[in-house]
Amino acid sequence: MNAAVQQQHILQATDWSKYSFENWARQLGAWINGDNETMTRIVKTMPTKRVTQEQREKLMAAYMGDESLIDRLCVKRRGTCCQLDNNEARAIHKIFLDLNAIDDEIVEEWVGTVWSHYVMDNSIREIATSNDTHIAQIQQDIKCGLAFIKSRYPHFKFDKFTKKDLSEKCA
């Protein structure tokens, strides 16, 4: 069986009602990064000088005992626990690859913003800063990107376009 036919089977076999599109993208990000519920990145550095075993033990004791010390440990906000199997991840990734294949600069920018926000879990402020633009522009790009994706893949539900009941907002 060739790869194109296999991809079609994966797309057809996936239960797309399981999540909204935004949550599929978040799940894909968790699958790509191998993240669990708390995303943690440890920065490794080379020591600038040699330390004795006694100094090493004191440093470790101080580091382990001080909860406010986050010198070499960068803890990111609460992440998404990956609940995708490999076929589901391949299916949603295939959709993003198809969207990336569209040769339109504006659509590429919209889809890139959706990818950055939902898959890579960058905040709207971080995206705006890195693109040297306003937060409102990034929010608009996300809405336009999701609207474009909705027009191409109408079987997805989208949290961004779902009206909330007043009872849900108050809860």
Image (tube, grey):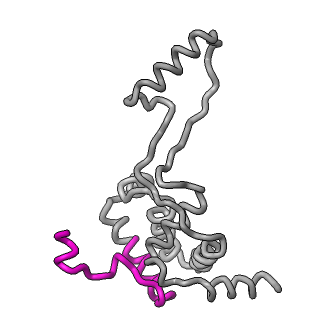
> Looking at the picture, does residue 149 appear above or below residue 57?
below
> Looking at the picture, does residue 70 appear above or below residue 79?
above
Question: Residue 68, position in %: x, y?
Answer: 37, 30
Check the image and name the residue furthest to the right.
1
Q: Which residues are magenta?
A: 142-171
> Looking at the picture, does residue 34 appear above or below residue 138?
above
**Residue 153 within the magenta-colored segment of the rendering:** yes
Question: Residue 128, position in %: x, y?
Answer: 38, 57
Position of the N terminus, as image quadrant, is: bottom right
What residue sits 43% from the left and 24% below the top?
Answer: 65
The reply to whether residue 97 is visible in this rendering is no
> Looking at the picture, does residue 108 appear above or below residue 126?
below
160 or 167, which lies in front?
167
What residue sits 45% from the left and 82% below the top?
Answer: 148
Question: Residue 28, position in %: x, y?
Answer: 55, 67
What residue sits 37% from the left and 59% below the top?
Answer: 124
Question: Residue 134, position in %: x, y?
Answer: 32, 59
